[in-house]
Structures are given as structure tokens and as C-alpha cells.
Amino acid sequence: MLRLLRYRILYQTAALVGLVLAAKVGLHALGWEFIAMSPLHTSIVAGGIFILSIVLAGVLPDYKEAERLTSDFTATIDNMYEDGMSIQKNYPEFESTGFREALTSTLAAFRDDIVHNRRKAYEEIHEISDALAQMELAKVPPNFIVKLKQEQGALIRVLLRLYYIQRVRFMPSAYHLVISTAAIVIGVLLFTNLEPFNASAVALALVAFIFIYLIRLIGVASTPFHRQGATQDDVSLFLVEEALKHLRGDESDQKDQADSNPHSSL
């Protein structure tokens, strides 16, 4: 069932094309095809596809940026984690448990925020400052702390950019123009008298499929992240999931080692 839902854009487009064909059959039966075929029809269809292509080209850069920023956010969290573990080895007075938990909570909140349109990760990132303050008390060199604070700032920049991409549609007026253009083109073809009728119906179905599918694709690309199974075109978060397993797995391994060797810290 989940696999079928991933292709719902195709199914929805096919259903809408079926409605267009049904309308064409009805108009043909009623004799309401009062527009004569002319070379202008070719220009109308080509112009409509051109407009859709421009809007789609404007949406894709944000979609690609969302893919890059997701990996950048995950890589920064992982780098901060490794730095924290290294600092603990060299400065035993620093307890890394709180730092690790803050990073894990930030990454988990980041995943939930961009999918479910929440705003918890922003607060979680600022919670990392408490762990950095503990580093100062543990007499960790300032240059190490400054590096981590810079990476904390980078997390905020990436997060805010992804919030914007996920919520704001690229040029809403252009999107309305695309819908209007598609409606005009399909409407003109519906009322155009094309002979033979079977060939005209196939041509209408192809044009309608292209326009409707492109509009749906623009809508999906405008919102790069969706709930699991909503669409196969959403930006994958597998790197985030793997990083969470890494952070939590290392924590479990360290606990197991401590339990198996209770005198290791002596």
C-alpha cells in the first residue's frame, strides 16, 4: 500500500486526464465544439509548455539546495560530535553526555521539523550552548569552543534556510499563471473541432497529461520534504537517520563497555 501511495501523482494525473476525456466526449456528443482547428493551436500548446518549463526551472534550484543543505546539517552535527568525543579524551573533566544528547535531540528535531512543519530544532540548537559552557568550566582551550560555536551558527543558518524553502512557494503569482495557462490550453482543445475524433481525443489526453503532471511536479518540488510515503520525489532523509543511529549507537556501545568493565575508569 505504501509503495502505491508513492506513485499517487501519476494516478491522480491519470484520473484528471480521464475527466478531461470524459468532458471531451460529452462536448462532442452535444456538438459544442465550435472552435475550428488552426495553426494558432500549435502556438498555444507550445507557449503553455514553455511557461511551465520556466516555472519548473525556477523551482528546481531550491529543491537541489534542500538536498545539499540536509547533508550539510547532518555533516556539521557529526563533526561536532566527533570533536566533542575528542575533547573528552583530552580533557576528562568535560562530561560529553549532555553534549551528545543535545546533538541527538537537535538532529531528531531537525528531521521532524522539516517534515511536519514544526519549529523545535531552532530551540534545540541553542541548547547546545549549555554544553559549550560546560567545556569552559572544564578548561577546554577557547579555540576549540570557538570552532564549535561557529558550527552551531552554521546549523542555525542552514535550518532557517530550509524553513524558508519548505514553507514559501517560489513566485506564487507564477504558479497561478501556470494553472491559468493549463486551464486555457485544455479548455481551447476541449471546444476545438478536430477530425477524426479518436485521434483528437488521444492528442488531447497527451497534452492534458503533460500539463497536469508538470503542475503537480511543480507543487511537489516547491515543498521538498513530505511525510513518509507521500511521494517518491521528496528529498531523502536517510543521511539523517544514519547519523542518528551513529550518535545513539555509540552511546549504547559506550554504556555496554562500561558495564562489562566497571574498573575501566579507575
Image (cartoon, grey):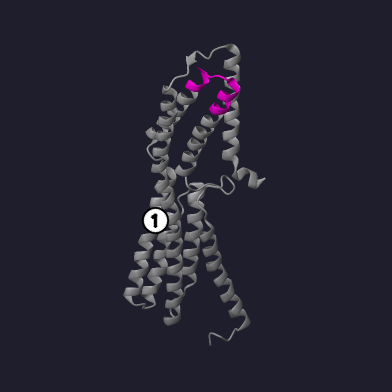
**Residue at (52% x, 68% y) in the render:** 247
Note whether 180 is above or below 242 in the view shown: above
Amino acid residing under circle 1: Val
Q: Is residue 203 magenta?
A: yes
Magenta residues (range): 188-204
Main secondary structure of the magenta stretch: helix
**Residue at (56% x, 39% y) in the render:** 9
Say what secondary structure mark 1 lies in.
helix
Image quarter (top left, top right, bottom left or bottom right) of the N terminus: top right
Q: Give the image location of residue 138, x and y in percent.
A: 39, 77
- In front of the other: 44 or 54: 44
Note whether 24 is above or below 91 in the view shown: above
- Relative to 142, 215 lies left or right: right
Residue located beneath label 1 in the image: 158
Which picture quadrant has residue 238? bottom right
**Residue at (55% x, 23% y) in the render:** 200
- Relative to 4, 112 lies left or right: left
- Relative to 2, 133 lies left or right: left
Note whether 94 is above or below 50 in the view shown: below
Q: Is residue 141 magenta?
A: no
Q: Give the image location of residue 90, x and y in percent.
A: 42, 82
